[in-house]
Image: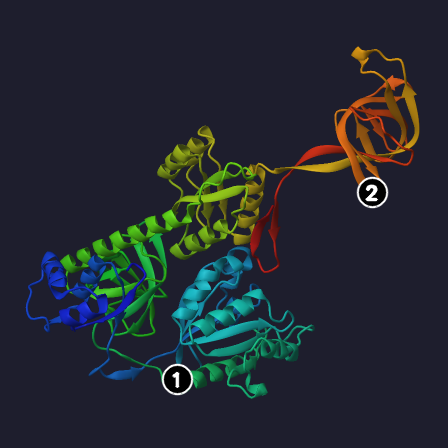
Amino acid sequence: MPDRTINIFEGMTISELAKRTGRSIPFLEEILVNVGEEVGSDFDPVSIDVVELIAMEVGVNVKRLHSNEGAELLPRPPVVTVMGHVDHGKTSLLDALRQTSVAAKEAGGITQHLGAFVVDMPSGASITFLDTPGHAAFSAMRARGAAVTDIVVLVVAADDGVMPQTLEAMAHAKAANVPVVVAVNKCDKPAADPERVRIQLGSEGLLLEDMGGDVQVVEVSAVTKAGLDKLEEALLLQAELMDLKARIDGPAQAYVVEARLDRGRGPMATAIVKAGTLMCGQYVVVGAEWGKIRTIRDMLGKVKDKALPSMPFEFEGLRGLPMAGDDITVVDSEERARMLSEGRGKKLEKNRLKKIGEGRIETPDESEDVPERVELPIIVKADVQGTVQAVTDALKSLNSPQVFVNIVHVGVGVISQSDVDLAQACGACIVGFNIRSPPSSVTQLANRASIQIKVHRVIYHLLEDLGNFIVDKAPGTLETQVAGEAQVLSIFELKGRTKSQGGDMKIAGCRVTDGRVTKVSTMRLLRSGEVIFEGSCRSLKREKQDVDAVGKGNECGLAIDAYNDFQIGDVIQCLEQVKRKPKFVSSESGSVRIEC
C-alpha cells in the first residue's frame, strides 16, 4: 500500500485507524506498544503524532487534517504570490510597492529564489508577498508558490504579451484553486498594447471582468508607479471577498518556503504560518528533520518571540536542512520529535530506493542497434534548497539517448574538499550555483585530480555551459553523407589484363559536379535516380596519374570493385562516414534540451 494516502487527525482512535489502513486492531496495538505508548480501549483518542508513527509502520502515506473547532478565528493578511514570465517585471513591481530596489542587485537581473516579505500598504493594510522566479528551470518553485498562497498576481508585460511561463503560472494557480488578479505591467512603454494582452488571456480561458468573468485586470507600470493604488485595491477587494481568517491559539501549522545553510548559524528555514502561533523553544519536525526552535526572525532580521499567521519568518535550530515545501509539525517533546524524524527518514529512503529501481532502464536486446550512451556524474551545490532542486531538475532535462546525466550528490553551501573527494571517486563534474568560489586549497586539489568545477551565478549561463559540456562528452552517431558527385561522360575498357590483375576492367570517364571524390570512400552508382550498385573505389586517376581525391569541375577516370556495367549519364556518389554530435537547444522561454 505504498501509494495509499489516508487522512489523520488529533484524537483519532485505533478503531478508526484500523478501518482506514485495512489492518486489524491487535496488529495496530502491537505497533502502539513498540512506539512506547500504553494500550487502552480501541476507542480511546490517540495523539496525531503517534497515529502518524503507526501509519508509517503499516506503510501508508498520511495527510494531517487540522481542526479549528472551538478556536477563535481572527482576520489575517492575505498571502499573495507574484507569478509570470521571465523579465516581465515581477520583482520591479514589488520594488515599486515596497520602495526598494531588489531587481538591481540580482545576478543577471533575474530572480532565482522564492522570496517572501510583508508590504505595509498606504491604506494601512499589510500583505505578505511571495516573489517567484520566471525562468523555465524554476517550475517547481512556482508550483510551490501557488500551493501556499491565497491570491496569485499574474504579471504580463504589455509589450510582450502571454508567454510560456505565463501559461504555466495560470496552470499552477488553477491546480491550486487560487483566485487570480492580472497586472498588465510596462504600460509606459511605446509598444505597450494592454488590449492585446486581454484578448490573449481570454483566449487562454481566463475569465476577465471585461468579458463577464470575475478576474480583475489592472494596468500598471513599475517604472512610473502608475496603477499601484488600483492594484492594492484589487488585492484587498479579493481578500475581503475570501474572508481570510485563521486561529491564533494552539500549535502552528506552517510550511517551509526556502531553506539554506548559514556558516555561523547552521540550517536556516524561511517559512510562513498558516494557522496557530509558532513559539521559540518549541520542538518541531520539518519533513525528515527535527530540532528545537532557537531563534525566530522576521524578514528584516529583527528577532521575534513568536510567528503569527501569514507572517513570513526565518528560524534556526534544526539538526539538518529541510526540503523547500515541507510542512512544519509542532510536537510535545524531544523524544517524539526524534521518533517522527527517524520514521519519516526511513520512509524517504525507501521511496528514494524505489524510484531508483523504477528509473533503471531495462537491458536492451543485444540484437537491436542501440546507440552508445555515456554516463555523466554531476555533483550539485547551491545557495538554498530550492535552487538545488531547480538546478537538479534542469540538468535532468538535459538527458539524451547519448548522455545520461547522473546527479550523484546535491548539497547546500560552498564546494568543499569532501565534494572533490567524492567527485574523484566517481569521476564527477562539480556544479556550483549562486555560491562563493571554492577556497584555493579546494581548487588546487580539484586541478591535481583533473576534476572540473563550474560555478555560475545566472541560470542561463549555467545551463548553456553544462549543455555544451554534455554535447562534448556525447559519443555522437556515425552517419553516411554524400561528399561528392560525378557524372559518367564516357566509358573506357581495358582488355587483356592478366587474371592476377583482375581480368578485363571498365573505367568510367567522369566529371565531378559537386564536392570532391576520394579514393578511400565508398562509391554508389545511381541510374535514373535509383541505386544500382554500391562498392569500394578500385582506381581513381586524373590525367593518367593515380590520385587520392578529385575536386569539383575536374575530370577523372574511376573504377569500382566488382562492377563493369557503366552507362553514359550514370551518377556516381562518393559516400563518407561522419560523426554527428547532438546539439544544445535553448528556447526564448529559457527551457533547454539536447537534440540528437
| Quadrant of the snapshot with the N terminus | bottom left
Gap between marks 2 and 1 measured at Cα: 72 Å
- In the picture, measured across the screen, residue 490 lies left or right of residue 245, that is right
Q: Is residue 526 visible?
A: yes
Asked if residue 195 is positioned above or below residue 159 in the image, the reply reads below
What residue sits 11% from the left and 56% below the top? 34
Marks 2 & 1, CB-CB < 8 Å contact:
no
Dot 1 surroundings within 10 Å: few (below 14), some, or many (20 or more)? few
Residue where numbered disc 1 is placed:
242
Could you tell me the amino acid type at mark 2?
A: Gly
State the image quarter where residue 477 is shown. Answer: top right
**What is the secondary structure assignment of the residue under circle 1?**
helix
Scheme of colours in the image: rainbow
Residue where numbered disc 2 is placed:
529
- In the picture, measured across the screen, residue 323 lies left or right of residue 446, that is left
State the image quarter where residue 520 is shown. Answer: top right
Q: Identify which residue, 568 or 230, lies in the foreground.
A: 568
**What is the secondary structure assignment of the residue under circle 2?**
loop
State the image quarter where residue 408 is shown. Answer: top left
What residue sits 33% from the left and 48% below the top? 353
Residue 197 horizontal/vertical position (percent):
62, 76
| Quadrant of the snapshot with the C terminus | top right
Q: Earlier in the sequence, mark 2 or mark 1?
A: 1
